[in-house]
Every structure is written in structure tokens, then in C-alpha cells.
Image (cartoon, rainbow, N blue to C red):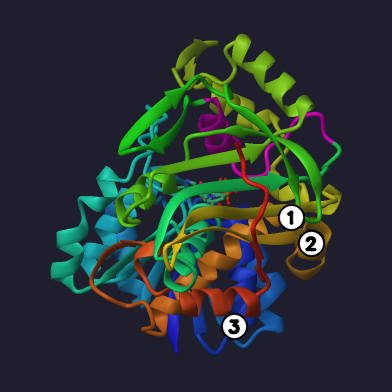
Amino acid sequence: MGKLLIIGCGGVASVAIHKCCQNSEVFEELVIASRTKSKCDALKQKLQDKTKTVIFTEQVNADSTGELIALIEKHRPDAVLNLALPYQDLTIMDACLKTKTHYIDTANYEPEDTAKFEYKWQWAYKERFEKAGITALLGSGFDPGVTSVFTAYALKHHFDQIHTIDILDCNAGDHGYPFATNFNPEINIREVTAKGSYWQDGKWMETEPMAIKRVYDFPEIGEKDMYLLHHEEIESLAQNIPFVRRIRFFMTFGQSYLTHLKCLENVGMTSIKPIMFEGREIVPLQFLKAVLPDPSSLGPRTKGKTNIGCIFTGLKDNKEKSLYIYNVCDHQECFREVGSQAVAYTTGVPAMIGAMLVLTGVWKKPGVFNLEELDPDPFMDALCKWGLPYTIQSDPVLVD
Ligand code: NDP
């Protein structure tokens, strides 16, 4: 069917690459390009004998639009799947525009020097992508991504109006370290130390970081503490789901994680403001990343499950109803299948599915889209086929 260029070769990319290689009918050729080429070569060596997909590897600095254009012109992929960091979204989108190549990512753009992620920079490309006749699919991970598709599916099949959405992200995995993050530590810590916010009655409501705590009894997991965070899909869902009155995002954290984080914050280690150290400028958070465990090394040690999903309330045939759609994923089963823990798995699988739907033409239309704007049914079918089946529960316990 086609050729995909994947940029980045970290935790999430590794899963997406494994999944593309399981799906050789669609991904006949794969180019893996990243800053550190040896990681791409190691993955190629591991997978090439077990798949019909033909794999190429390249070195690229994705901060350079020029390098990206040269890479795309050399390989002529049908689409680019951006699994580097959110800082590279715009340079990669620019290269896609220039070469008229479809674009897919999993996280919205964030300038490196301000921890503020918003869609405005990427939505500004809408007209240019329309004119170029190419598709940009924003946020094809789990949250955002699958949570956006769950919402579109609920609206298409179960509600006439959705009034509230609570997105619940529970990771009950235990990796045995007192403190580690499950995906890129820099991006993860920027997200959880930011102020919380939610959408209510047409406005953003801001809270201090981790100020709102709830306890929820998660199916297949049990009771966990969860905290309200700002999260990028709230912004697009608020725009794309008519009649919605409130959207919140909660993530579970254990006490050990929170105590360590507070301590690191108190001593200035989570700051993104550069400081001088022994004659050179360093960013404390980037230094912290260098001393923390690499998330891709957590796979063999992590036991337990994740449960990520959305609780909806609203109206169907003029009657109030509520529904919970969620996926449960087991860290060790993911590790057995693709050598990664469930947080990378739950992001890498939807990244492959988004790329597949663009490559096969099912979701190919000119413009810049968040996932809830497209027909959810083919994505929901693919989730079941490719390892992330979902459960739909009526009348769930609601979050107060
Ligand atoms: P990693 O840090 O493990 O991987 C990032 C990869 O990008 C590394 O291979 C890195 O290279 C490469 N890279 C970074 N900068 C550049 C650059 N300038 N040029 C070329 N390559 C570069 O991150 P994750 O795999 O954990 O996360 C990947 C993305 O997925 C992030 O954007 C993250 O926000 C997103 N994500 C989305 C989720 C969702 O549900 N939607 C959930 C979790 C993550 P090197 O190996 O040299 O460091």
C-alpha cells in the first residue's frame, strides 16, 4: 500500500514501528529517522527478519526544516508520523507542506522555553494544508487520540447531546523505582507541574497544580487517587463537541511520585529556565531527565495495568444518560508483545492506526484535524484489531 516516514525512535516510536511491521500490507516500506541513528539501526536489526515491511534508517535533526525536506525528497514517503518531541511539530509540518506529504503526530506543539501547550500554532496551518491538498492529523495517541475518538463515537452512536466529559487516565503500573516517568520525563514533568484547568460553560477555569483530587474505583484496577490536570484534548473537544458544558481531565499519581516531584520542584530541579553551571548554560529539567531512568527501560520491570477512558453524560431521546468507554492494558502483556510498557503501547498503537487510516485513504482529506472531527468507526474497529479493545459501561459511577 505505501511508505511511512517515522521521525523519532524513542519509547512511543518503538511500539508504533513494531505495529507497522505487524501490518506490512499497509506499511510496505518504513523509514525510521531520528537524532540518534544507532537506535533506528538497532530496531531495524531486531525487526527486519520478522516482517515483510522493508525498513530504512536515517539520521535527522528535526529542528531543521531544510534537513527534513531533503529527507522527505530522498525517500518520498506517503506520510510522515512525527514521534519526536512536541518542539518539532512545526518544523515537520513546514517540511510536509513544502513536499505535499501527509502529517500525523501525537502531541501538540509547545515552544521549548514556555511550558504552554496549545493548538493555536498548529491550527494556523489549516488553510495551507487545505490548499496543498494534504492531511494533518493532530494528536493520534491515546490521550489525546483515542479519548477524542471515544467522544466522537459516543456522540455518533449513544447521545444526541453530550453535556459533560471526564477523561480518566489511570496508570496502576509499578516499576519498582521510587521516581520515574512513563514517557519522556521532560514533557511529562512540564505537563504535571503546570497549573490545572478545565472547561466549564464556555470558559477555562484555572487551578493550582494538583489542587483538585478525587478517588475513583477503576474497573479491573480498584481505587486510586487522581488529580485534575490541564490536557490538550480539552481545547479541541471544547471547540468540536456542540452543547458540551464541562470537560475535565484526571490522572492518577501515587504518593511516592508526588512526594519526589514536590521535593524536586522545591529545590528548582523541574525549572525550564536556563542556569549557568560550571561555565555552561544548562536547563535544570533537562539535567534531571538525564539522571532519571529512561522510560524505554521500564518495560521489563513494570507490572500492573492502565485504564484510560471517558465518562460522558448527556441526553438521548430527551432522557438523561451516562456512559463510560475505557481500555484496560496490561504492562507485562505489552512487554511480551513489543518489548515496551503499556504507556508507550497505548500511544504507539493509535499512532500506527492514525497513519494507517491516512495511508489507506479512509481518513484522507485536506486540512488540519483533531481526531474527534473524523468518522470514529474505522478507528474503533482498528483499536480492537490492533491490541487496544474497549469496554462500554452504562450508568458508571460519576466523578463529583
Ligand atoms: P522519547 O524521548 O522516548 O523519544 C523521542 C525521540 O525523538 C527520541 O528518539 C529522540 O532522539 C527523538 N528526537 C528528539 N529531538 C529530536 C530532534 N530534534 N531531531 C530528531 N529526533 C529527535 O519520547 P516518547 O517516545 O516518550 O514520546 C514521543 C512523543 O509522544 C512525545 O511528543 C510525547 O509528548 C508523545 N506522547 C503522546 C501521548 C498521547 O497519548 N497522545 C502519550 C505519551 C507520549 P534521541 O534518541 O536522540 O533522544
Q: Residue at x 52, y 65 (%)?
A: 351
Mark nearer the N terminus (1 vs 3): 3
Is residue 318 rendered to the left or right of residue 65?
right
- Name the foreground residue: 164 vs 134: 164
The stretch of residues the image draws in magenta is: 177-193
Q: Which residue is drawn at 30% across and 64% down?
A: 70
Q: Which residue is denoted by mark 3 in the rendering?
A: 23
Q: Residue at x 55, y 28 (%)?
A: 286
Residue lying farthest front?
318
Determine whether label 2 and label 1 are within 8 Å by CB: yes
- One can see residue 67 in this view: no
Residue 211: quarter of image:
top right
Is residue 138 rendered to the left or right of residue 147?
left
In x, y percent, where is residue 337? 77, 70
Residue 341: numbered disc: 1
Quadrant position of the C terminus in the picture: top right
Is residue 66 rendered to the left or right of residue 15?
left
- One can see residue 16 in this view: yes
- Name the foreground residue: 81 vs 312: 312
Give the SS element for disc 1: loop
Q: Looking at numbered disc 3 in the image, what kind of residue is underneath it?
A: Asn
Q: Looking at numbered disc 2 in the image, what kind of residue is underneath it?
A: Phe
Quadrant position of the N terminus in the picture: bottom left
Is 188 magenta? The answer is yes
Residue 335: numbered disc: 2
Mark 3–mark 2 Cα distance, whole angstroms, equals 19 Å
Residue 180: quarter of image:
top right
